[in-house]
Image: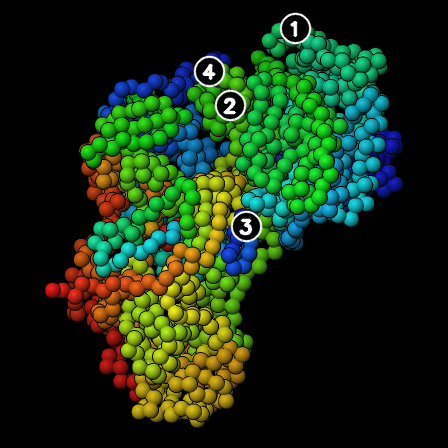
Amino acid sequence: MRAGSNRLPAPAGLLVDRERPVSFAWEGARYWGLAGDTLASALAANGEWILSRSFKYHRPRGVLTMAGQDANTLVQLKGEPNVPADRLPISEDLEAWGQNYSGSLKRDRNAVLARLSRFMPVGFYYRAFYRPRGIWQAFWEPIVRRSTGLGKVDRATPHGHFDKAYGFCDLAVIGGGPAGLSTALAAAGAGAEVLLVEENPVLGGSLAYARFDAEGTLAAARREALVAEVEADPKIEVMTGAVCNGWFADNWLPVIRGNRLTKVRAKEVVLATGSIEQPAIFRNNDLPGVMQGSAAQRLIRLYGVRPGRRAVVLAGDDDGYGVALDLAEAGVEVAAVVDPRPEPAPSALTEAVAGQGIEVLAGHCVAEALAGPGNRHVRGAFVSRLDGQGGAVPGGSSIACDLLCMSTGYMPTYQLALQAGAKLGCDDAGAHFSITGLPDHLRLAGSVAGATDLEAALAEGRRAGLRAAKALGLKAGSEPEVPADKGQAGANHPWPIFPHARGKDFVDFDEDLQVKDIVNAVADGYCEIELVKRFSTVGMGPSQGRHSALATARLVARATGRSVAETGVTAARPPFTGEKLGVLAGRGFEPERLTAMHHRHLEQGAQMMTAGLWWRPAYYGTKDRREDCIREEVLAVRRNVAMIDVSTLGGLEVRGPDAAEFLNRVYTFAYAKQPLGRSRYVLMTNDAGTVIDDGVACRFRDGHFYVTATTGGVDRVYRTMLWWNAQWRLDVDIANVTAATAGVNIAGPNARAVLAPLVEGADLSAEAFPYMGLREASVAGIPARLLRVGFVGELGYEVHVPASFGEALWDRLLEAGKPHGMTPFGVEAQRVLRLEKGHIIIGQDSDAMTTPDEVDMAWAIAKKKPFFVGGRSIELRRRHPSKRKLVGFTLEGADAPLPQESNLVLRNGEMVGFVTSVTRSPTLETVIGLAYTAADEAEEGAPLRIKLTSGRMVEGRVVPPHFYDPDNQRQEM
Amino acid sequence: MKIMPCPLNGPRNISEFACSGEVAEMPEPNRTGDEDWADFIWMSNNTAGVVREWWCHVPTNYWFIAERDTVTDEILKTYPAGKVFTARRDFQGRDEGP
Amino acid sequence: MPWGLLKYGLGRRYPAGPDFPARPEFKPRYDVVIIGGGGHGLATAYYLAKDWGITNVCVLEKGYLAGGNTGRNTAVIRSNYITPESVRFYKESVDLFNDLSGELGYNILYSQRGQLTLAHSDATIRTFRMRAEVGKLVGTRIEMVDRRQIREIVPCLDMDENARQPILAGLWHRDGATGRHDAVAWGYAARAAEYGVELHQRTEVTGLEVERGRIAAVETNRGRVRGGHVIQAVAGMSSVVAAMAGIRLPIRSYPLQAMVTQPVKPFLDPLVSSSGLHTYVSQSSRGELVIGGGSDPYELYSTRSTLELKESLIAHTLELFPFLANLRLMRQWAGITDMTPDYSPIMGESPVRNYWLDAGWGTWGFKATPVSGKRMAETIAREKAPEILHPFRLDRFKTFDLANEMGATAASH
């Protein structure tokens, strides 16, 4: 039969399409399923129940929840580990494998580890494996590392396509079960724009699989009606197959569907997230074939799969009786209903079960699930009577079965609420839960809020929807009454825990932790719930405590003589379920900034480098000729003329009556008396007196300065200026025009010759336009500002134009320079040129504590100003002079080694400084550099002992840093 | 993602903003001793509670003041800097001597 | 097979006594009161007892042992800092870590697998070279490595030269290691308790009574405690507690987030860190990938997680390891880091004569657990901070003599 031998006839199988069989591969063999099957349901239909091997003991595991809530079903796909099989749809190209086994999934050689479990008490690895010294890392850890972990990552995995979207709504309803549906309808009815997010492929929640009445028809009817209403409502947007994976501040919700992350901002949120059925604890409760009652119901109703042939139902609540009825209807022989309650309250469901002649053993428990060969499937239930305190009385009887359903209670799906800051409370017995302390604009509805009765859940949903609508300012109708009895009583058994002397009574399936592990952790002294978690690792696996938190709290409470409420559960953290890293990363947009001349650089063969977000030309030429290219560019500037794109340098317009006063306060120098048409150096210190940026201030008018800043510093300088003036309230306006301006620096003895013919409106002669002067003129017809500044130490002009003219300016200048053989030069050459002049680069020759005094810039500190940022601190620091000083140094000799930046300067084996900039100067043909050295050994001629990277020591000499043209004749031509 | 209600731009995602620390009035530099000055530069209240802070909306470079609870992360109010810094500030010079 | 486990397995009786005794009632007076039951406080208690014979000590912990930053960090141990003073200090810690399991009789799962830090810019290469040179000078195992060597150390790293921020070079620190952070605290706690140190969990300090320049008493939610000396080791709350003694600190507290993926079979041995991408990654012995990055951008006393930080941190992680796109994230959390202006701690004397500071641990605290415990114990016993702590004195800010370590963490600010 192509659908699988366990397939039930229609109408069972809401999600599957019997007309469309699909084949897929599992563990190397091919199987048939139906479109709409998940891997787990299709395999179950084919009688394949083993899906994985557990973390530590390598026990066979299979379906537990059929809802993606557990980690027993994690399988390996090509390029993707840890995929929940009960959420993975089958397809023709699906190839899935088990994980974490040696040999085969059905016969894992590592299962022998389970026999050693007696030697591995909780926290055993803390007690041993560390003597002799180093043995853990050398021997034991590699073994542990190899045996832990579940699936495998594959280095060859191609990066799939992931993307992100934004969503906005008035109300986000998380969960499309009865409460969620009714919330959405109520709010939309009042006019709200509603987003309804549902994890499963279809709406309905428990209405799609559970049984609420003896006849078993109520759920489907209700579901059909509600879903039809929702689908017809234009104000409700439905996302199925979508998980809201967390709650973040101000109702910011990550909704993940496939490989897309939609970030939703909702004005109001209602969590109708339902409850998670909890396993009962008894020996071998982890065998394939032992599953939640709701898992069996999902198999039957959603996938049309008969979950077994002969069943025992452990029913500690009314729902378990519904499960028994569903099983019987599906043709499963229900051998017994085992109810730990001595006197189960009669209800329609209990009576229907009795009416079917199904044996009910009240006051009994399952003491042990009997295992078939290799623990591969359950073969029976060993049932014992319970004593007055809820413990199993020794002795009992076996009931043969191949299906054991657990239906002993639920935990509200509290995770999102607790992430939002709410608190989980419960009564002493730990059987009734409450969530309190929700922030504004966040509400609950349904079983997550304790309303397990269907009518109560629907009423609560309606009420929450109306309240949300009211909070949105909409006109909403009167709220319905929510019945006082929401169904809490009897929904959860307070102690479905039946420890066994021989163990394997699992509290945490992910971590293979048994009852005694939790009890022993407490006995070891780890009494706080968080310590129990960290010591035993309970709740630290992929299920993140969904099925272990409650049982752990109950066991720890009992062991420490406290109530469950006092003991608490460990903190709920996002994400709610595992989320792919690719979904979080998305497509990866990285901004970058290009100058107006960018394409010219590429065309001219530049090797580009990043400067923050900008791309700049490092040098022009091929990589194998890097050093030669840089050398040639340096010499071109020194001997002829060359030009560099300086568009990235910061440009700030500072205008207003207080412009000069403002500059006086943010820079160290004095600007009040700066003449018009002149530039002046600007040095910025922070309020601790540390050098942070520099440039020049060009005064065009009394109240108008154009100030430059470093490429990397301008954004911060600008923001800082605005911050200061927000406090000083000076009459000044500051604008950051860096992106609006393109600039070229044309430098070299022939610079004037190249530029002058292009200039109209300014006389470029030395007398008319001296060094540090500035002019507004037109260059090749382009309106420009011309600055004569001296960073590289040759006659030079910076030409600043509006950015849209940048490329044209570049072209015209190159053309004009052709007769002189003018070429472009890049950042690397510029760094050499400035070093030959002894100019510092802030951030390279200075660090987070450098003062102007340390770098010989005391001259840039105006003495008469009452205040500038950093002034007071500089004054203070002068009373505790620095122990280091930045000096120039040389290493003489043609064969002098070239130190590297950051090589240490030593004295008597101690570090007293380090090299900050160094080069073998093409112009001077000797090694020059800047370095910090001891302040008391910084005078000219002092030795500078450098430890090369190789370890060898060399000795240089301290010299003034003005290596090239110390009298500045070349730049002042 | 928290929402920051910018006085100029309205409510925006907090990732659009930069915080610059507690609003503090700079003491008169030339009338403050070294120890008090070092204190002003380095020490912080680092209050667990409501703090008045400087915030900047980075895309528009707009600085403003927010009152925020540093324990609950609740933003209580935001307003232009001019509400606190109401007049032009000038600094006193060093004492000229006798 | 370790004998203890063998005996247990064959005998069926659980090992003798608990690691920590139950919380006792307060004594009228202690020689030392330690505020803060995290790694630093517990280590201090241990060394007071072991090195100095001072056992009349109590540790006051507001929550559960090591529930603060000790239980929330990404467990990296290293000494590849920038200044010689810092490197010397952290090296002492690494040396203590090397046999800490043996000393404490508690396996801290110490694994020295090496840390590789990646440079994506020339400026970073300069800083790396400084760290390598200083490290070599002080005697740690550290060197710069090129792209070819990086490929050998971490073969699965993405070395695409056309990436937006390609890897240019690396800093390879063989001393880099990880340890089980909780176990470090539990080991110190268990051994300290054996010496007679009292551990008081769920005991919150609510005030400090200062009289004539000394702490006269410590107020708690369980009553008053007197101590000859009092030390605070309360990362995440340093300013709040110091304020109780009337002390202001140069600290600002920011959340620092971290996260962990589901466990997979081993594929990454060393620790990998990128300054430019503000990301560091390691694979735990359980198989999970532990990922951390930069601090949150504004001050907050909360351990909440955010989506935006997770998005950018994971995007950067995938730039280093693109093949991990289908690996699933399992959990995110945060600690509260006390950031100082120079990224160095504050240790030693305070303005109050018998009140000692162990604060300002930012993102560099866990790795210093042994050395801070040992040296703070020495400070208290001798009533004077030793030379090695001199760069970290609170007074350094008075003279602007900062111990500048900015640039030595990927968790940059």
Q: Check chain identity for marks 4 and 2: say if they share one.
A: no
Residue A785 position, x and y percent, is 43, 82
**Residues indicated by labels 4 and 1 sit on the same polypeptide chain:** no
| In this rendering, the label closer to the viewer, 1 or 3 | 3
Residues packed near mark 3 inside 10 Å, few (<14), some (14 to 19) or many (20 plus): some
Q: Are marks 4 and 1 in contact (CB under 8 Å)?
A: no
Q: Quadrant of residue A46?
A: top right
Dot 2: chain letter: A
- Between disc 1 and disc 2, the foreground one is 2
Question: Which residue is at 70% across, 32% downward?
Answer: A460
Amino acid bearing label 3: Ile
Residue A567 marker: 2
Query: Residue C117, how many percent across, how many down?
Result: 42, 51
Figure coloring = rainbow
Q: CA distance from mark 1 to mark 3?
A: 62 Å
In this view, the mark in front (3 or 2): 3
Do pointers 3 and 2 mark residues of a single chain?
no
**Helix, strand or loop for disc 2:** helix
Label 1 sits on residue: A395
Residue at mark 3 to residue at mark 2: CA–CA distance? 35 Å
**In this figure, which residue is indicated by the disc labeled 3?**
B3
Identify the residue at image location x=46%, y=32%: A140
Question: What's the residue type where badge 4 is placed?
Answer: Tyr
